Image: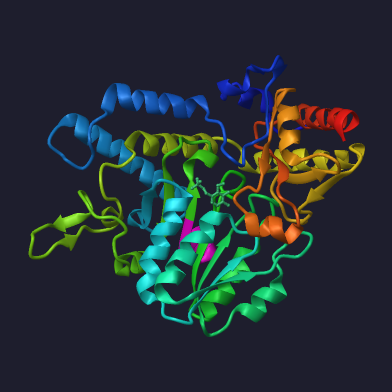
Amino acid sequence: SLAFDVHAIRRDFPILNQEINGKPLVYLDNGASAQKPLAVLDAMDRYYREMHSNVHRGAHTLGDRATAAFEGARETVRKFLNAPETREILWTRGTTEAINLVANGLAPRLNAGDEILVSHMEHHANIVPWQMVAERTGAKVIPIQVTPDGDLDLDSFNSLLNDRTRILAITHVSNVLGTINPIASLIEQAKKQGVLTLIDGAQAVPHFQPDVQALGCDFYAFSSHKLFGPTGIGVLYGRAELLEEMPPYQGGGEMIERVSFERTTWNVLPYKFEAGTPAIAEAVGLGAAIEYLNALDRKAMEAAENTLLKRANELVDTVPGMEVIGTSRHKVPVMSFKISGLHPSDLGTLLDQQGIAIRTGHHCAMPLMDFYGVPGTARASFAFYNTLDEVETLFAGLQKIQRLFA
Ligand code: PMP
């Protein structure tokens, strides 16, 4: 039995309580986007009903309320990441924009022949922005190899880290494999060589809380919508010293100190990187999501998630021809798989007919698909609100599909 009351938790997520194709919804696509608790919906609703106005204008009471809610959420995020200073927390549209912002901001430091280390298991969001900046600067993007089990190949990392390396940009957790990378030691080694580090935390934060000071990374990015908050907003933590030195990402209102046709100067952090009217209600919603999580027993939550993964692993043998891709011993509850004789996209459709939502395809990780020699995989990704019954339902569904169609 699970160590915390998952049925009570599920009452906080009204979307989970519905039928799809005549069957109770089993939502196992949390890695793509997670569902939102009532606390988030209520916070955003209340924001729009009672306090909406533009922020940082200071001319009237509503503007002050909106600003307080917006900046309060930033402080909630700072505490969540244990960042030293609130001005080191930038709002972005998501992980993707956060990484683009950093790649653009570090471009002036890069010269021809410099090397940017990524890994073979990155999401496209942590490959393509670096390729674009490499194109501009003559730097090279070099992938750290992955082992067949889906772990980062540490020998490959050690042999690739050298005096041309400028940046290590790596995911904390793989969205396909679920692997938790040993980023603390990678960061430590990178720092010894003066290499800057960016961690893609998109798939980590829904499962555990990172501590950017303990990790010692320079940048840490994540998306609200995977952390049970709204879409349209995400976070970049960056060390103040680096953010100060980096050029702005976009120009416009809010990000300036003074504009004239002779000379324009930049606003202080974090506003220098926040051109235009921000996603205010979304920031408030993300703050509410983090506060919701803070009120839960996160240790019990992690234990419950591990129980789900353990049960899923036990059931793999009950589906003939099923093979799991990503068998690291250090992983979050994500299971990518294939079943011989079945195309992943057919698997997705057939499961949906039984009310079960999973993701199929390349998961924005085409280099990793190439490494495993597959066009795509099926992926079940669990959240703390999933139950053991749902794991059983998934496997009963897979057994049925395998019997009828494989
Ligand atoms: N990195 C990883 C590891 C991801 O899983 C995702 C989302 N699938 C992203 C980056 C991109 O996040 P977003 O689309 O929210 O910007």
- How did the renderer colour the structure? rainbow
Residue under the image location 75 percent in, 23 percent down: 354
Q: What residue is rendered at 49% in x and 50% in y?
A: 222
Asked whether, in this view, residue 275 is left or right of residue 359, the answer is: left
Residue 384 is situated, as x and y percent measured from the top left of the image, at 65, 36
Give the left or right position of residue 405, taking residue 189 as reference.
right
Whether the magenta-drawn stretch holds residue 214 is answered as: yes
Q: Position of residue 263 (x, y in %)?
A: 11, 65
Work out which quarter of the rendered image holds the N terminus and state it.
top right
Check if residue 397 falls in the magenta segment.
no
Q: Is residue 207 above or below residue 122?
A: above
- What residue is at 38 percent from the left and 76 percent from the top? 109
Q: Quadrant of residue 247?
A: bottom left
Residue 150 visible in the displayed image: no
Can residue 293 be seen at all in this image of the molecule?
A: yes
Q: Nearer the viewer, residue 395 or 303?
A: 395
Q: Position of residue 169 (x, y in %)?
A: 53, 65
Q: In this picture, which residue range is highlighted in magenta?
A: 211-220
Q: Is residue 175 above or below residue 285?
A: below
